[in-house]
Image (cartoon, rainbow, N blue to C red):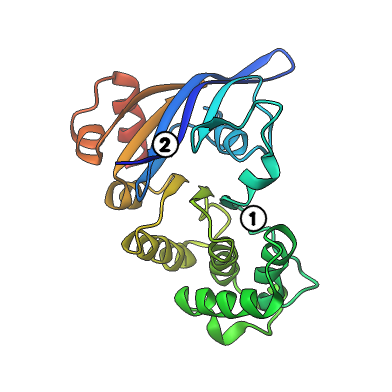
Amino acid sequence: MENIIEIKNLKKSFGSKKILKGLSLNLEKGQVVSLIGPSGSGKSTFLRCINLLERPDCGEIIYKGENILQGDFKTADFKGKLAMVFQNFNLFNNMSVLDNCTKAPIKVLKASREEVEEKAIKNLDLVGMGDFIKARPSQLSGGQKQRVAIARALTMDPDIILFDEPTSALDPEMVGEVLSTINNLKDLGLTMLIVSHEMDFVRRVSDKIIFMDQGKILEEGSPDQIFTSPKYDRTRQFLNVNL
C-alpha cells in the first residue's frame, strides 16, 4: 500500500514539559488508524503537530516524498490536504451551515463558489444534513454540528481527515449518529486518523490501533491484537478500565 504520510521521531515540548517523546507513524492510503490512551498521553498534541497547528520541535513529517518541516516546503499547500474535525466543532456561529462548509475551500483552494457549493451540498447530504444548509449552528444539536464539521472537512477534498475526540462534547444520545457517520466514511475508502475514547467504535472501525502513554507509542497492532492480546500490562490496564 502507498504511504500517504510518514512521521519520524516527532518531539514536542511546552516549556520544560515533554509532551511527545519521539513518535513515528506511517499512514497508508485508505487506512483508518485510531490513537487511544489515557488523558495527557499526547494524542491531541500529536494530531495538532501533524496538522501543523503546533510546530514540532524536531522530527520529520514526510508527505509525498518531502519533509514538510523543512524551511523550503510550502506548508500552506499541505494544510489543505489535511482536514481536522475538532472536539468542539469550531463552526462560525454567524454563518449558515452551507457557508461554514464553503469558506475554507474558497479561500484555501481558490475554487469557484459555484463549484464549492455544489460539493458542499453533496457532502452535507452524505452526512444527513442536506436539509439544514440555511440553518445557523445555534439552531443545531451537538450531533448535527459535528456532522456539519465532517461535511466541511470533506469539502476540502483532503488526503487525510484527522478526528480529535469527535464525540467528547456530545450528549450520550448524540454519539451514535456521529460515529455512524464516521463509519460510513470508511466505506468510502477515506484515510482517517482518529483520537477517540469510544472503545467499541475504535475496535470496529480501525485497521490499526496505536496505544499511547506518557508521550510515547507503547504498542500498535490490529484491533484483535490490541484488544485480545496486548503485549503490555499498561495497555491491558487501560482497556480493562475503559471497556
**Residue 167 spot, x, y in % from top left:** 51, 55
- Secondary structure of the residue carrying tag 2 is strand
Q: Is residue 237 left or right of residue 125?
A: left
**Residue 111 spot, x, y in % from top left:** 68, 68
Residue marked by disc 1: 88
Q: Residue at 67% x, 80% y: name it.
A: 114
Crowdedness of circle 1 by 10 Å Cα count: few (<14), some, many (20+)? some
Q: Quadrant of residue 14?
A: top right
- Sequence-earlier tag: 2 or 1: 2
**Residue 196 in view in this figure:** no
Residue 21 higher or lower than 154, as above or below: above
Residue 192 higher or lower than 109, as above or below: above
Q: Quadrant of residue 207?
A: top left
Q: Is residue 206 left or right of residue 69?
A: left
The type of residue carrying mark 1 is: Asn
Residue marked by disc 2: 36
**Residue 1 spot, x, y in % from top left:** 29, 41
Q: Is residue 223 left or right of residue 129?
A: left
